Structure formats: structure tokens, C-alpha cells
Image (cartoon, rainbow, N blue to C red):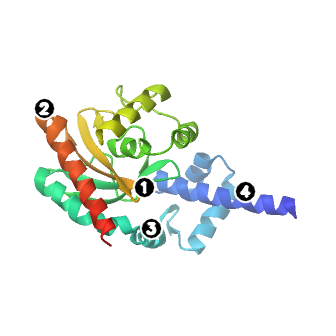
């Protein structure tokens, strides 16, 4: 029984690996999915067929693509986050003041997850998308979150996810990261100065409620618009004020 149970768990893991492969490849045939996961084509075909049967994938000719059923689950998960409703007005206020893009970000399984946004007319969004999961250490919103997690949790996340470099400015050393997180805690906000994309900057502040870290709010844009006094003082004041407004909204509920 124990062996059979282990095989079922492994099979389920492979099923999700195949689903992840189709998503990552933005559509794939049997061979592409099998190669991506590292399994036999016959095994990939069985899993792809199962995912189609349960409506997680759609088959179009010989290619499979992710269907809309996962969207239903994702929207349900998002709608259960009380923080989303509380953050809406503050996201809009940040955009009104900056005309850039503002995001609400939370942490799950050691990754940053974009859960809501407000978009200005001049907004540039080279890496964000609602539902997208990215490393925490190289974005302002992620560093704002890490700064308010226990150090042992930060170390565990780094052990699991690593510190991959996105640009030459990305922090890839744990001690350096811990030092920056201490600075972030002291000043109340985090910056991203070309650590994800060269020429792109962001400022973020954590959102805390009754001693619990809920997520962070961030505004980002091109370096040529986020510089000087604006980047050093104005945006930090704006984004920490927006975080405080969200915290007050949650406290009044």
C-alpha cells in the first residue's frame, strides 16, 4: 500500500509538471512537453489527455494550450484575499499622482505574486502580470516583504529559490541581501534600481496589519522618470503613505 501510494503522488506531480510545461512553452505538442519535463512521449501523452479530459488544457490540432478553467480557480483565490479590496483606492491614488503603474504583491511559497494593479497612461510594465510569480530578492515589492519576515524564513527561501541574477545590479549574496533588508526595515521602504531590468526602477512599502505581514505596494517606471528627488524622497513618501492608508482601511473593517 505504501508503494502504491507513493507512485500515485509521483504521478500527480508529473501531471502538474506537464501542465507547467505547457504554460511555460505557451502551448506545446507531445514531444515538446515530454522533452521539457524529461519523460517519455507516451507518458506525456497520457498526462496531456488527462488534463484535456478535466478541462485544464485545450487541444488544438496537435498542440495543447492551457484552458480557462485555472482562471476560475485563480480568481476565486484572489477574491478571498481581503487585502485586494482594501488596497484598491490606494493603488488608484498612487497612479493619479505618478501616472505610472502600481502593484499589490503578496508572498506565497517563497515567491512574489502580483495580485492587483492600477495603470497610468504612461505606465510601462516589462515584467509584471496579475498572477505571475517571480523571485522576491530582485524586485522592490519582494524586498519590502523579505525585510519583514523572520531571518530564518528569509534563509529558507534563499535555500529553496536561490538568488539568481537578473542584471549586474541584482543582489546575489545572502549577507548583502540581509544587510539591505535591515536598511529597508529602518527606513520603511525598498528600492529596485535596475535589479530586474536595466533602466527600470521601483519603490515599495510593506503592508502590515495587527503585526502580520500581508504584502506590499509598489510603484515602478523607467529610470528617466524615476530619478533625483522624485526617486529619493517623493515616491518613498507617496508609497509609504499608500501602505499606511491600506493598513488604516483594514483596521477600520
Quadrant the N terminus occupies: bottom right
Mark 2 to mark 3: distance in Å? 39 Å
Q: Nearer the viewer, mark 2 or mark 3?
A: 2
For marks 1 and 4, the one nearer the N-term is 4
Residue 129 locus on image (x, y percent): 34, 55
Q: Which class describes the residues within 10 Å of circle 4: few (<14), some (14-19), or many (20+)?
A: few
**For the residues bearing labels 2 and 1, Cβ distance under 8 angstroms:** no
Q: Residue at x 26, y 41 (%)?
A: 202
Asked if one can make out residue 151 in the rendered structure from this viewpoint, the answer is: yes
For marks 3 and 4, the one nearer the N-term is 4
Horizontal relation, residue 226 to residue 79: left or right: left
The residue that mark 2 highlights is 228
Residue 175 locus on image (x, y percent): 48, 26
> Which mark is on residue 74?
3
Nearer to the camera, 169 or 72: 169
Mark 1 to mark 4: distance in Å? 39 Å
Q: Secondary structure at mark 2?
A: helix
Question: Looking at the image, is 121 positioned above or below residue 185?
Answer: below
The residue that mark 1 highlights is 211
> Which mark is on residue 122?
none
For marks 2 and 3, the one nearer the N-term is 3
Mark 4 to mark 2: distance in Å? 53 Å
Q: Nearer the viewer, mark 2 or mark 1?
A: 1
Amino acid at each position: 500500500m505504501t508503494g502504491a501510494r507513493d507512485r500515485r503522488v509521483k504521478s500527480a506531480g508529473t501531471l502538474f509538471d506537464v501542465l507547467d510545461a505547457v504554460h511555460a512553452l505557451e502551448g506545446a505538442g507531445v514531444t515538446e512537453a515530454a522533452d521539457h519535463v524529461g519523460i517519455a512521449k507516451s507518458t506525456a501523452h497520457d498526462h496531456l489527455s488527462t488534463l484535456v479530459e478535466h478541462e485544464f488544457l485545450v487541444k488544438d490540432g496537435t498542440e495543447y494550450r492551457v484552458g480557462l478553467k485555472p482562471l476560475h480557480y485563480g480568481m476565486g483565490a484572489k477574491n478571498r484575499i481581503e487585502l485586494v479590496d482594501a488596497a484598491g483606492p490606494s493603488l488608484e491614488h498612487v497612479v493619479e499622482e505618478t501616472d505610472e503603474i502600481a502593484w499589490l504583491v503578496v508572498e506565497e511559497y517563497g515567491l512574489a505574486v502580483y495580485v492587483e494593479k492600477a495603470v497610468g497612461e504612461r505606465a510601462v510594465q516589462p515584467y509584471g502580470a496579475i498572477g505571475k510569480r517571480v523571485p522576491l530578492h530582485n524586485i522592490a515589492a519582494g524586498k519590502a516583504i523579505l525585510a519583514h519576515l523572520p531571518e530564518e524564513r528569509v534563509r529558507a527561501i534563499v535555500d529553496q529559490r536561490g538568488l539568481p541574477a537578473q542584471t549586474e545590479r541584482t543582489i546575489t549574496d545572502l549577507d548583502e541581501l540581509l544587510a539591505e533588508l535591515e536598511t529597508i526595515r529602518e527606513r520603511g521602504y525598498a528600492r529596485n534600481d535596475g535589479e530586474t531590468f536595466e533602466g527600470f526602477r521601483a519603490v515599495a512599502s510593506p503592508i502590515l496589519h495587527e503585526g502580520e505581514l500581508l504584502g506590499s505596494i509598489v510603484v515602478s517606471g523607467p529610470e528617466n522618470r524615476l530619478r533625483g528627488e522624485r526617486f529619493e524622497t517623493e515616491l518613498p513618501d507617496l508609497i509609504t503613505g499608500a501602505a499606511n492608508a491600506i493598513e488604516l482601511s483594514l483596521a477600520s473593517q
